[in-house]
Image (spheres, rainbow, N blue to C red):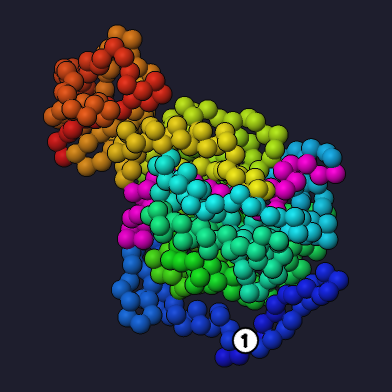
Amino acid sequence: MNETMTTWSRNRDGTLRRQVSRALTITVLCVLAVAGCRQEGAGSSILGGPGGKRTLSKDERMEWWREARFGMFIHWGLYAIPAGEWNGKRIPGIGEWIMERADIPVSEYEPLAKQFNPVKFDADEWVRIAKNAGMKYIVITSKHHDGFCLWDSKVSEYDIMDATPFKRDVLGELSRACKRHGVKLCFYHSIMDWHHPDAQAPFYPNYNDRDRTNPNFASYVENYMKPQLKELIDNYGPLGVLWFDGEWIGDWTEPQGKDLYNYVLGLQPNIIINNRVGKGRKGMEGLSKSEEYAGDFGTPEQQIPAKGLPGVDWESCMTMNDTWGYKSYDHNWKSAEDLIRKLADIASKGGNFLLNVGPTAEGLIPGPSVERLAAMGEWMKVNGESIYGTTASPLGQVPWGRCTAKPGKLYLHVFDWPADGRLEVSGLEHEVKKAYLLADKTRTRLLLTLEGRNKIVLTLPAEAPDRTNSVVVLEIED
Ligand code: FHN
């Protein structure tokens, strides 16, 4: 079926020109591709894929992600140039929101693209930094709320190839580097778009006005956003995750979220999609209001759920300082120790940790981030087994730290090393066969004494192997 398609190009004077052409409707293709699909519930099978492809259960799709537990978030775009300042003034709030927070019209923000020339960008280096930290996947902003695209989009000229002097396909380079280093590439993609005239651009100076709608929004979705997502999957896939955001806008509905969810799965049946594709997330708590909502996992933001949620996949995304996009003067860094403990805390509650970096306009991951990631990597090299593929603590909360689990093993993350060498472990439901320090390559048995039916006391050496988090392994009857 043919249908009109709107694309945008630029006139000589720099203004946008709308071009309407006849095009094969991608939506129709998608509907054919996902014929027989339905929104899945937890654990159910999905997608009678095209061409007799085997259907994938949610558990199958989530397998690598549950194993991974630790990923890198990258917020990178034109906002790295002002780096938190506009017209000589420091703009409060997160750096990637500067266009909204400083009331910058599209006509003044857009020319930043002409200055975007990150000559120090090295995809291999970024991926190496993530990999050495023990991270198994990278989620980068293909497009943030400001609308600027980090790849050569065919439906936009507001992208790295057409609008900047850099003219290098950042996502392409990252995709190849991720393949070389065995790291999964995933894309963050904003549904909200402050640059597109059919989305939120006309809402200036309040791009984020949730009460306003744009009568042309359906055209933005069908003729711009969906084609862009298809480009991303076709050109840089298979992707690990499509990580949507900006779903709180007045124009977005849960039925649209479900449609987009099915559309993306139709393009890549084994992809994972976060819950911000629809309207299910409960604010910054990020978990879904109920299973009726679209999405494969919850997205707590800047927080860790107090108790996790058994049976529910979730991922805490967090900044290392107070901004996602680079801000030159934000030095409020969390310590490496804090981040290592947060990783253990999240794993002990059954979640993933998506830790953010905001590279500079030159293309460098800031030094303080690199240092913290290196420290996390050192810890992960010794203790990664206690994080990867683990599930939530069967012991609940423990007074000395955290606990993670795998079949036949419990990992005791000891934050507070006992001065008297006695570590009490209560609530055990299985017999403990052996205990040793994960840092001890010889696996020397630690002395353990039984105290009552469900409690043991371990005798630990005087010195903690790691001042931040020393892991004791309990081998248990399965
Ligand atoms: O508005 C965005 C924000 O800029 C950032 O991308 C975070 C990351 O989770 N998400 C949004 C707010 O929920």
Height in image: 463 above or below 276? above
Per the image, the residue denoted by label 1 is: 23
Q: Which residues are magenta?
A: 58-87
**Observer-nearest residue: 187 or 402?**
187
Horizontal and vertical percent position of residue 89: 83, 39
Horizontal and vertical percent position of residue 78: 70, 53
Note whether residue 333 is visible: yes
**Observer-nearest residue: 180 or 6?**
180
Q: Secondary structure at mark 1?
A: strand
Does residue 109 show up magenta in the picture?
no
Residue at x-position 69% and y-position 68%: 162
317 displayed left or right of 398: right
Height in image: 149 above or below 320? below
Does residue 72 show up magenta in the picture?
yes
Which image quadrant: the C terminus? top left
Residue at x-position 40% and y-position 57%: 180
Horizontal and vertical percent position of residue 75: 60, 49
Residue at x-position 31% and y-position 28%: 471
